[in-house]
Image (cartoon, rainbow, N blue to C red):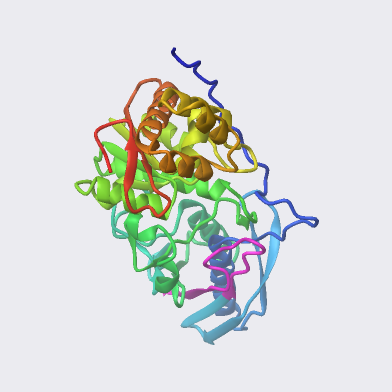
Amino acid sequence: MRYAEPPLREPDLPRTAKVRPTALRTGWTTGACATAAAKAALTALVSGVPQREVEIGLPAGRRVTFAVARCDLEPARRAEAVVVKDAGDDPDVTHGAELTATVDWRDRPGLCLDGGPGVGTVTRPGLGLPVGGPAINETPRRMIGAAVAEVVDLAEIGVRVVISVPGGEIMARKTTNRRLGILGGISILGTTGIVRPFSTASWRASVVQAVHVMAAQGERTVVLCTGGRTERAARALLPELPEVCFVEVGDFTGAAVTAAVGDGMAGVVFVGMAGKLAKLAAGILMTHYTRSKVDLSLLGAVTAEAGGDRDLVAAVAAANTGRHAYELWEAAGLLRPAGDLLCRRVRQVLRRFAGHAVTVDVAMVDFAGSRVVASSARWAA
């Protein structure tokens, strides 16, 4: 008997992904800190006085003051200022980074903005930045320009600002920069100047951006992985695809598929573990634990359809987690047929969500991420 197709849902998250008894402390983006450092250095160069604090404007119009950790001055020649990034309660790899701005004069009017050591260089298209230039995003560029214009008239005076981040290359190893083609350091980021702790907006945006980057390079198949272990399995499964095709979507499968369709992708491959697959099979396209849970009755129905006996169906339907259901299938020798059925259900959901605009294949990996155990297509353990 054909199963009833579930309704498609893509729930949104609250502003924070964790429930706490007190409010989480916001922080500042690398873009805001770089802007503050640039203004402090230029103010010192113009006034001849090293700065201890500096005020800048954020994109929404709010004015904020930053402490200047260091400000060195060579009168009439150059100045350098450092603002230390405070990410608030956000688990940010750039927390504590020393955003450094070195400022000097140039012969031609206007602002020349460049990246120094620790700021990445863009080497691939699709980021909205010139290839070969520094990874300083559009909003921080505007913020730095506005802050500089508060100190000098750029129509008459030429200013060169170099943003650097000591240790930025090491920090970048913990980001997805290399995969996006940003080499040699971190990106100077931020759209508001403010870091919202545990915000999911940045992750969702990075997923969408990763799809845009691969599309800009002419790739036609995107491989969506839920994390590092599933990505390892996916890359072993599809070794012919370049690294840029593999996108860690976390909980944001719906956002990734929407971006893939919008960019004209030809194919989507989803690689995940049992729990995420069960949520997707139930029609849930944003799978964070605060907004969804594994539907064990669905896994029970898959068990029955795969030929499981009544006791196994009952045990799966009463399982503690998706992983527990996986283990029950494995112990009963039913992992492959039940897993294949689950993958095919996820494939149907993703095709409906995409409007049949792309081909879709789905693979399930074990919990070590070492092998594919089931799929909707040609792959087998």
Q: Quadrant of the N terminus?
A: top left
Residue 172 or 98: which is nearer the viewer?
Answer: 172
Q: Quadrant of the C terminus?
A: top left
**Residue 110 appears at what percent x and percent y?**
44, 61
**Residue 379 appears in which quarter of the rendering?**
top left
Q: Who is closer to the viewer here, 115 or 228?
A: 228
Left or right? Give the position of 92 relative to 209: right
Residue 284 in view in this figure: no
* Residue 55 higher or lower than 53, as above or below: above
Any magenta on residue 70? no
Measured from the top left, where is residue 47 in percent x and y?
A: 61, 79
Residue 84 drawn in magenta? yes
Q: Which residues are magenta?
A: 83-105
> Farthest right residue?
21
Q: Looking at the image, can residue 206 be seen?
A: yes
Q: How many marks?
A: 0
